[in-house]
Image: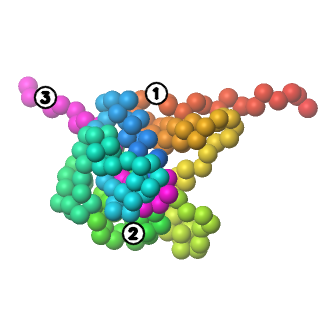
Amino acid sequence: METHAAAPRRLIIAITGATGAVYGVRLLQTLRKLGGVESHLLISSAGWLNIQHELQLSRDDVHPLADVVHSVRDVGASIASGSFATDGMIIAPCSMRTLASVAHGLSDNLITRAADVTLKERRRLVLMVRETPFNLAHLRNMTAVTEMGGVIFPPLPAFYNRPATIDQMVDDTVARVLDLFALGPALAPAWQGLNCPAQ
């Protein structure tokens, strides 16, 4: 009797030209530590500018963190097709331009094509949008993506955990994002409630 091996768990990570490149890089580092998940990486030209400016990292530093690296111009790549099974996609950080392209289904590069495929296949798409304040176009685009099944996840720090460093804030956000994909035991600590005296 013929048996078929289960498809490997795969996540697409895209880094675009908004501040917060550390989130995309930390996602890759965390997936590498977890193991068992094949990471597919996309970085826009503006994303590279931010990686270099904010993190002082080069391609030689970042590419080895991923299992597969795709050019954003390669619209014939495996992840451009819904027949290539993945658990979903995270755009971290997500620029307002990328948000707008996803919201309007432009598929004008491999990042937005992969996001479109993720939505059409009803897989989880998480956009870690970075901008402030939002204008009405931003809000409407976020609404459109949400209506299509995407998750808008601004990387806002949780202060109830009393983080002492930026790294702790980044790690907490990355853990919460990855927990959306149920890759294994929860990475982020569960809220246990406030230990307040009775009133």
Residue 101, percent from left and from top: 39, 69
Q: Is residue 86 visible?
A: no
Badge 3 density bin: few <14, some 14–19, many ≥20, Cα 10 Å: few
Name the amino acid type tagged 2. Answer: Ser
The reply, left or right, for residue 176 in relation to residue 89 is right
Q: Is residue 67 above or below residue 192?
A: below
- Compared across the picture, whether 170 is left or right of 114 comes to right
Q: Which residue is drawn at 30% across and 49% down?
A: 59
Which label is found at residue 3? 3
Residue 170 showing in the rendered view = yes
| Residue at numbered disc 1 | 185
The label number, if any, that marks residue 27 in the structure image: none
Circle 2 SS class: helix
Residue in the picture at 41% in, 44% down: 25
Magenta-colored stretch includes residue 13: yes
Q: Which mark is first along the chain, 3 or 2?
A: 3
Cα distance in 3D space between marks 1 and 2: 33 Å
Residue denoted by label 2? 101
Q: Is mark 3 on a helix, strand or loop?
A: loop
